[in-house]
Amino acid sequence: MFSSIGVTAIISMISHLIFIYITWRVITTINFDPLIRKGRETEARVLIIFITITIGTGVSRFFLEFLQWSQDLLYLF
């Protein structure tokens, strides 16, 4: 019982990190320089990191929930 909880935790952590990394790669291709005020580069980078974490985590949760739903289909019949 506890080993399955541990496996789920590891899969969730790895999934979150992978999707955050993918989101980071995508967001860094966008040119935000015209939107950033001079002297506010650090704050802009922190905001981009927060946006990356938010989007990556949301996509990861959808992915993990979709996997769980597909496993739950066994109980349909």
Image (tube, grey):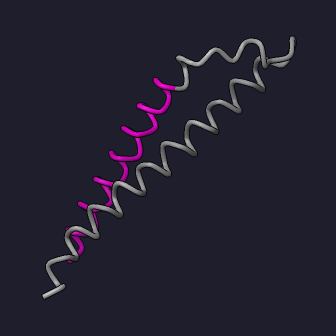
Identify the residue at horizontal 69%, vertical 18% (top origin).
32
Q: Quadrant of residue 72?
A: bottom left
Residue 25 colored in magenta in the image: yes
Q: Quadrant of residue 67?
A: bottom left
Identify the residue at horizontal 65%, vertical 30% (top origin).
48
Q: Is residue 42 above or below residue 49?
A: above
Residue 73, percent across and down? 19, 76
In the rendered image, which quarter contains the C terminus?
bottom left
Identify the residue at horizontal 64%, vertical 38% (top origin).
50
Q: Is residue 22 above or below residue 64?
A: above
Seen as rendered, the residue at the extreme bottom is 77
Instruction: State the predominant SS element of the stretch in magenta.
Output: helix
- Left or right, 7 with reference to 34: left
Residue 9 colored in magenta in the image: yes
Q: Is residue 4 above or below residue 59?
A: below
Residue 28, percent across and down? 54, 19
Identify the residue at horizontal 34%, vertical 47% (top origin).
15
In the rendered image, which quarter contains the N terminus?
bottom left
- Look at the image and give the residue range highlighted in magenta: 1-26
